[in-house]
Image (cartoon, rainbow, N blue to C red):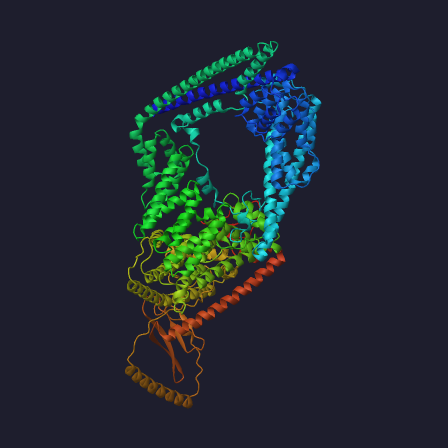
Amino acid sequence: MDNNEGESRSGSEQHGKQDDEENVARQEELKKSIDAKMALRQSNLNPERPDSSFLRTLDSSIKRNTAVIKKLKQINEEQREGLMDDLRGVNLSKFVSEAVTAICDAKLRSSDIQAAVQICSLLHQRYKDFSPTLIQGLLKIFFPGKSADDSDADRNSKAMKKRSTLKLLLELYFVGVIEDGGIFINIIKDLTSLEHLRDRDTTQSNLALLASFARQGRIFLVLPLTGQEIYEEFYKGLNITAEQKKIFRKAVHAYYDSAAELLQSEHAALRHMEHENAKILNAKGELSDENVSSYEKLRKSHDHLYRNVSSLAEALDMQPPVMPEDGHTTRLTSGEDASSPAAKDSSTAEALWDDEDTRAFYECLPDLRAFVPAVLLGEVEPKVNEQSTKAQDQPTEPATDPEQGQVIAEERVEISVEPGSSQEGKVFEKGKDKEEKDKEENDKEKTKDMDKEKGKERDVEKKMENEKEKVKGLEGTSLDALLQRLPGCVSRDLIDQLTVEFCYVNSKSNRKRLVRALFNVPRTSLELLPYYSRMVATLSTCMKDVSAMLLQMLEEEFNFLINKKDQMNIETKIRNIRFIGELCKFRIAPAGLVFSCLKACLDDFTHHNIDVACNLLETCGRFLYRSPETAVRMANMLEILMRLKNVKNLDPRHSTLVENAYYLCKPPERSARVTKVRPPLHQYIRKLLFSDLDKSSIEHVLRQLRKLPWSECEAYLLKCFMKVHRGKYGQIHLIASLTAGLSRYHDEFAVAVVDEVLEEIRLGLELNDYGMQQRRVAHMRFLGELYNYEHVDSSVIFETLYLILVFGHGTAEQDVLDPPEDCFRIRLVITLLQTCGHYFDRGSSKRKLDRFLMHFQRYILGKGALPLDIEFDLQDLFADLRPNMTRYSSIEEVNTALLELEEHERTAFSEKGSSEKQSDLERMAGKSRHTISADGQNGENGGEENGEVHEDIADSDTDSGSGSIDARRDEEELDDDGCDSEDDEDEDDDARGSASDEDEVHVRQKIPEVDPLEEANFEQELKAVMQESMEQRRLELRGRPTINMMIPMSVFEGSTKDHGRGLGGESGDEAVDEDGGGSKEIQVKVLVKRGNKQQTRQMYIPRDSSLVQSTKQKEAAELEEKQDIKRLVLEYNDREEEELNGLGTQALNWSQSGSGRVISRGNNWEPGSGRAVGTRHRHPNYPGGGGYYSRKR
């Protein structure tokens, strides 16, 4: 590689030396031509004209002169020598006017100007009246006078004539034939007349003439010259005054400005016409012939004017005018597709490429000349040949230098020989001999120069061969390595690098091997075709044979496959046609080849030809349809394709292929999307929520949202909060944090957010639309974040979870709302639990989540086999929330586990219910006994109990949520400490708090199965017993009056050894004595009366009998009523005392919303906000006023 770099460096140095030599040679040639022109100008300014005696010796016959004058009408470089010889041998003193007319009528090309200058110089040096007559004749071409309207051909010929005449006049002025430069002032003034701007054709020709004048006569316009030192001496002799230069410059620049304004107005007119044509197309569907022709005429005029103005600007060293761009830019292409209804609209030109990356891939190719030395690209030989041909073919200045010297020498010889008329023949022969000798010497010099140039060429060729031989040493091994890397080039950078590396092993044989490797691309590796085509396009800029060989091979393969007419090798056919299509997009394959391939497929539109045609259209059809030069033909081909599809009975696969290819090339028209215009306030809200919101700016966003006019924008703000799916998924928790922060100041807004979220979740379940899935996932995440920020209770979360599992099940629409193969509801549950499920780790919420996860497993097993991503998410969910939970493998196992769970809960409820009520009775009895026995402490204890009850009521009545959070915290702490008073309660742990003790517990109990026969016998026996007892009771009531017995005091004075505590009934019929031990029976004293004497008897009644239970409930109700009355009376007294003493602070604290607790409960109190902080969150205090909720740690 180092050798290659050294060789390339030496080659570049040699190439730089060669360029320097070329510049030096060019400068020498230019200097020679300038010297020749200066010599010719000296001869023309001081002509040595022959006298009349010498002219008489020349041929003056009419025939000879007429023949020479006819030759003057066809002046060219090839006939210059012979024509000058003829002019030297004739006497045209009487035919000067005819000679001038012939010269003026001659159709001179740019290459013939120097020959005409030589001939005019010869005639000027011989005939005195030639120059004035010539000037008048040439000026008549610019000022022809009034004439009838000419045709387009005449106008074009006149414009060409003026251009060549202006060049001739300038050259004649430079060589001294014309001495007065003032004639150009009249010409330029006429060309720059603003009246000509009214005629577009005259304007176009005048701009071209002025551009030619500016390029050739830069000295007149005071423009900088290339090779200033060489031209300075040459232009010093021209008598051009500063005033004349000022006139020229002012006239040309003024005309350029006017032409630029005309171009701007014409561009505006063209744009307006395009808009009008677009309206007509939308209304009628086509343009009239008149509109089409007028548009074409205006567009062509605009294009021509733009080119001429740009050419004049370039000649004046100015920037060309820039046309304004808008949605309907002017199309500077052929207008056929603009007028065809089958093509695109004339007003809208679609972009050729879909995006900037695609355009760069197909159009921005690397310049190999910038990376690789020219020797390796094989470009040095053509340059040397071009230089030699330029040296030989320069017809203008260098070739005339020796000829001019030869002509002058011949004229001097003739003049010196004229006086000896007697020896005229001898002298003439001697002159001829001298001429022949001079010619021979010149020929010898030319042959020597040619030999020197050939020797230089041979040296360069030898050097190139040596360099190529050095490079060939590494070609064999490196080319094989390059070809092995070729299939791995699947990016633009890799294929460009490989292209540059190939240039270092470039040779004809290696190029053939490369083309063969590119052609043999694997038929299944279609993704390589664009990169191979890019390599071919890059190499074709320097190696034309690469693209030609590959195209020939592809075309031959296509013809072979299409003519074979078999249904084999479909992959090879597709590879072939897609390769051609990719080369077409790089403009390597001509469009005609693509259309011929497509036509061959459409002619036999069956079987594989359908696939080939569709693949071709999918590859380059859109490119050809959008290219202006091929749009019409491609549109016609597409129409033929659709007609064939409608006529032929194609199978569904082929029909779909054809439709896809057609609409890929020519998408169906659709109306432009109307941009929604929002008020500035709405735009600012969207900017805050969707652009500015992040962790660092949430404080600023909250402050700005609070400053908004909420009466105007609250509804729109709610709408934006519900569009959490439009923002970033990772910032949903910030929206929830804003909701919690705003709830302190706009509580109704926070409630509306929660309502809307729940409604959106239910709407998603009702519709089950695939397009709403991202939105539904975002709303589930939003709901979980709202729980994290203590804005909803856990009951809402669990209700939503169960709703997801059961919604729509058991209805006729179950298969639509929740299809068996649809696992999206599982993803919703996973999203919600991943967001807030880790907070359900203790207390009743933990049991609720355990119960739900079992139901969730039953739902999952009902879905059958799950996708892998869902299964992995489920594994992660259970590992995070319940790593020790059993994952069941069948629905039967889950059902069994659920039955066991329900049975366990039912037994636990039944056992705990009686113990709870017993403990309540004991507690209330203890309170009553304590109150009766301790009179001194009655008021204090009553006040404490009153305070506790008051706190509980206040907590249950709060509506902000913090009280319920504290209650949930207290409840969970109690659960963690092992208190069994609430172990299996099913009430909501967030909504209830520590409210009343009369909670209803609903327990589902399994009904035991009873034999119907036994049940009938039992009913009969029960009826008989009841009937007998009723009859006995009726007889007793009739026979004995009601005994009103008083309970004796001895009943209350019993020993504590016999009973624990006596509870007097309301009617005095019985007294219940509850044993303090753990026995299942209760000792009861029964009061009886025999005669006039009252006696008591002891009885043992089971604890769970109805008598004991009803007695306990009655006395507990009486005790609670007494406590309520006592609490209300004490509260009233305390309030009166506070009002009288002026101490109302405690009452004020009770009345604030969301407080409901005093500092002694252990909460963190915020004086500015009046809210208590729960255990799930902490409050960062912001200077905006108050604090809002941050996430749970």
Q: Which quadrant of the figure has residue 219?
A: top right
Give the camera-side residue of 784 and 257: 257
Residue 206: percent from left, percent from top: 64, 34
Q: Which quadrant of the figure has residue 299?
A: top right
Residue 939 showing in the rendered view: no
Q: How many marks?
A: 0
Q: Which quadrant of the figure has residue 538?
A: top left
Give the camera-side residue of 849 and 137: 137
Q: Is residue 890 left or right of residue 311?
A: left
Give the camera-side residue of 293 and 361: 293
Residue 425: percent from left, percent from top: 55, 12
Residue 382: percent from left, percent from top: 42, 27
Q: Is residue 335 left or right of residue 3?
A: right
Give the camera-side residue of 169 and 535: 169
Residue 470 showing in the rendered view: yes
Residue 855: percent from left, percent from top: 35, 62
Q: Quadrant of the N terminus?
A: top left
- Residue 1082 to residue 746: above or below: below
